[in-house]
Image (spheres, grey):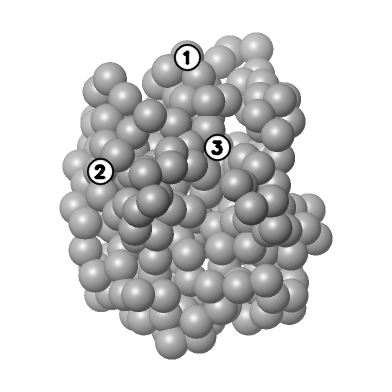
């Protein structure tokens, strides 16, 4: 399976066109949009961005909201079958389970729209496990885990989440797809699990991920 991972579009219509075109050009099977679709915009604005990607890519688009998206997007049910909101949900595609959580932990300035305490994040994540645990799964989280390079702000503040790190270490996904920290684009590792911050799509960044036999091969790329 080939995945195109993007995040932090922040309302850029131009980036949405580039994402859809990139997905088609590289033969992506799905696109993961990992939050901050808008820049404190509306649900309608988010839908416009996502619909543009759907129309150009012609593959399923899975997304979670980011902390700069409207809170109503957490429960938004898209009209298109190719567009799936996976916040606090999981979905199976081609033998892999995609598990999502949107928003962010409480930010230092406490001024964004979708923020959770660590306790709230822990409760959301606990509800995603189920009786059989998680097998062959991909974690889609706007907020990165704490204590990795891709969670470090330019100021030196670690914006990662302890609840998200615990979840990763407990259930060991194949790959973690995150965003949120624009300046921390890159690939980190928790054990053998790659943690991928694709960088802001509004600045032309993306990541390609190939899943093969329960392993992820990750390539930082541009739109």
Where's residue 206, x and y in %? 31, 63
Question: In the rendered image of this protein, does residue 81 appear above or below residue 128?
Answer: below
Of badges 2 and 1, the one in the foreground is 2
Pick whichever of labels 2 and 3 is earlier in the sequence.
3
Q: CA distance from mark 2 to mark 3?
A: 19 Å
Q: Secondary structure at mark 3?
A: strand
Q: Residue at image x 63%, y 63%?
A: 68
Q: CA distance from mark 2 to mark 1?
A: 20 Å
**Of the residues tagged 2 and 3, which is closer to the observer?**
2
Residue at the disc numbered 1: 170
Q: Give the class, few, some or many, for how many residues have Cα within 10 Å of label 1's Cα (few <14, many ≥20).
A: few
Q: Is residue 6 above or below residue 147?
A: below
Give the mark count. Answer: 3
Q: Position of residue 72 (x, y in %)?
A: 80, 60
Give the residue displayed 45% in from the left and 61% down from the top: 7
SS assignment at label 1: helix
Q: Quadrant of residue 11?
A: bottom right
The quadrant where residue 119 appears: top right
Residue 89 visible within the image = yes
* Proximity of marks 2 and 1: CB atoms separated by less than 8 Å: no
Quadrant in which the C terminus is drawn: bottom left
Residue 131, horizontal then vertical, whole percent = 65, 12
Q: Earlier in the sequence, mark 1 or mark 3?
A: 3
> In the image, is residue 66 above or below residue 17?
above
Give the number of the disc on residue 148.
none
Does dot 2 land on a helix, a strand or a loop? strand
- The residue pinned by badge 3 equals 99
Name the residue beneath numbered marker 2: 187
């Amino acid at each position: 399976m080939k995945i195109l991972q993007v995040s932090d579009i922040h309302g850029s219509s131009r980036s949405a066109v580039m994402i859809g075109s990139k997905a088609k050009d590289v033969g992506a099977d799905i696109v993961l949009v990992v939050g901050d679709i808008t820049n404190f915009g509306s649900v309608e604005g988010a839908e416009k961005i996502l619909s543009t990607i759907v129309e150009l890519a012609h593959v399923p688009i899975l997304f979670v909201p980011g902390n700069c998206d409207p809170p109503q997007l957490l429960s938004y049910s898209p009209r298109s079958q190719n567009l799936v909101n996976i916040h606090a949900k999981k979905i199976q595609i081609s033998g892999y389970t995609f598990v999502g959580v949107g928003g962010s932990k409480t930010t230092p300035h406490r001024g964004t729209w979708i923020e959770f305490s660590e306790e709230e994040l822990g409760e959301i994540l606990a509800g995603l496990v189920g009786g059989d645990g998680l097998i062959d799964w991909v974690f889609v989280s706007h907020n990165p885990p704490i204590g990795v390079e891709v969670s470090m702000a330019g100021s030196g503040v670690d914006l990662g989440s302890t609840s998200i790190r615990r979840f990763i270490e407990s259930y060991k996904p194949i790959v973690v797809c995150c965003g949120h920290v624009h300046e921390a684009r890159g690939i980190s590792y928790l054990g053998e699990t790659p943690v991928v911050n694709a960088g802001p799509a509004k600045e032309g960044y993306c990541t390609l991920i190939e899943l093969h036999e329960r392993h992820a091969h990750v390539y930082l790329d541009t739109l």
